[in-house]
Image: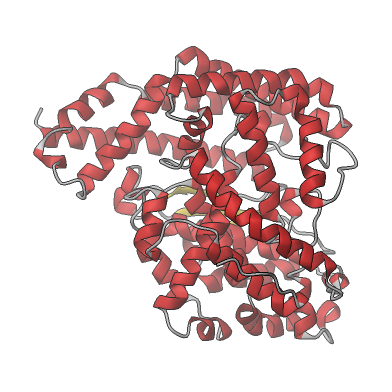
Amino acid sequence: MTAVESYIELIRRTREAATLGSCASVLGWDERVYMPRAGSSFRGDQMALLAKMAHEMSIAPEVGEALAAVEGSDLVRDPETDAAVNVREIRRAYDRSVKLPKALVEELARVTTRAQQAWQEARQANDFPSFRPWLEKVVALKREEAQAVGFKEHPYDALLDEYEPGTTASEIKQVFAGLSAELVPLISAISESKRKPDKQILQRDFPVELQKVFGTSAAAAIGFDFSAGRLDVTTHPFCSGIGPGDCRITTRYNPRFFNESLFGILHEAGHGLYEQGLDPEHFGAPLGSYCSLGIHESQSRLWENQVGRGRPFWEHFFPRAQQIFVDALSGVKFDDFYFAINEVKPSFIRVEADEATYNLHIILRFELELGLMSGDLKPADLPGAWNEKFSRMFDLTPPDERQGFLQDIHWSMGGIGYFPTYTLGNLYAAQFMTQARRDLEGLEDDFRRGDFLRLKTWLNEKIHRPGRRWRANDLCKRITGKPLGHKALIHHLRDKYAMLYGTTTMITG
Ligand code: ZN
């Protein structure tokens, strides 16, 4: 076979594996939206079969042979060509897969399935001892995985590489340290402020049917294409990019709380816009795939927080919300509503946290995970370490384990290394948005008219279309001229809360 033929074969195989993966996505979506409860065990069999087939496809020796035939050929001489980018990324994924012993992959799948059940029960009952042996097993297996994959500095890097290719723990540590140094004083200044929003405005009757109408219109306004997507209801909201022309998002409705579905929909629609903006020509290949989880999250946070919690957005949407939610919002002043949706208040649960304190939840988890992976922190000592850190950072003591270290599913799933991508998303979102405002003059006036097309097109061109062409931090440098830092996010938060809470904090450069 010539190098060109080998490349065609390589892409055919990659696309086939992605198509199989998309079948699993449809089943996963169905499982959470429609499937009757009694079908869960059989669905498990279906999913396990697909996962096994996908794994076999990904480690097939033919992939390695095709890669070897293409690498070093003229086809990939220029590293900027489509072929070179695809080959580089397929190699990366292939090497990672073949380094993992089959026994370890199977053991991880088996242990994490049972650990998730154990976690669910332990969380319900505030019973860490019943979960502890499972956590110990998961952590031991993840440390083994890091050894198998290999790393230069910290075993954490090997796990991070799966979610945030090319980013290291020490880079994240540095950015988070800068963020934390400025965020902590800002949050204390807000806590000490005499001004408080009237949150009760948001806790009135918001009929679910009307929330659906309002949320759907907001998602459509920012550009989510409903002819190529759906919005459904699930307990835990998610976005599933199934393939070209099919991207599904979900939400949950709380009839007595405005924020839950609306900001959830904007968040998932932001993920959805990324999926809908990927190049369908390259479906299945790295050039048609998202860059990293941090970049994916930047797209959801950008629409949810940077745009969706901003004044211009609500100058357009608030009068419409008042027309729809007549009982709850007529007579409510714009400024009171805007303050209420932007309340900052330290709390126990990550997923309910506001735009500012959210990042402290992530920094705490990241620091604990580093300890678990290096071996400095034993899983048995996690509850104490969590509470000690939490009291120091939030000035609150978790009343129980459920509202403390047992709140998240990630560790039981083996998702160590995943948490930092949420705050990376916030940081990237702020930096991208700062640049978009520079590139697109009068952008806020667009928002005041309910027009989001220029921003969406900018994101399509700069972030969505390139797929995996560049690593996250390189993408950031290309778009904003700078590597990822904490300044853009801090400026955004400081400006917003200065207006609302009258806070001023020292600017340190
Ligand atoms: Zn998200």
Name the quadrant containing residue 475: bottom left
Residue name at image x 34 percent, y 60 percent: 478
288 or 370: nearer the viewer: 370
Q: Quadrant of the N terminus?
A: top left
Task: Determine the image quadrant of residue 206.
Answer: bottom right
Residue 309 visible at all: no
Asked if residue 337 lies left or right of residue 13, the reply is right
- Identify the residue at the far top of this view: 103
Residue 392 percent across, percent down from the top left: 79, 46
Q: Is residue 117 above or below residue 417?
A: above
Name the quadrant of the C terminus.
bottom right
Query: What residue occupies the far right of the structure in this picture?
Result: 399
Left or right, 353 with reference to 29:
right
Which residue is rendered at x = 53% and y = 45% of the image? 172
Return the x and y of residue 128 as percentages of the image width and height. Answer: 82, 26
Please tell me whether residue 281 is drawn above or below residue 4 in the rendered image. below
Q: What count of labels does the image hold? A: 0
Q: Position of residue 388 (x, y in %)?
A: 80, 38
Q: Which colour assignment does the render follow?
A: secondary structure
Report the residue at 66% width, 51% height from top.
237
Residue 449 appears anywhere in the view: yes
Q: Position of residue 218 (x, y in %)?
A: 61, 71
Q: Is residue 470 above or below residue 299?
A: above
Q: Nearer the viewer, residue 227 or 28?
A: 28
* Along the line of sight, the residue nearer the viewer: 46 or 357: 357
Query: Viewed as shown, does residue 135 lie left or right of 336?
Result: left
For image coordinates 70% across by 85% down, the residue present is 319
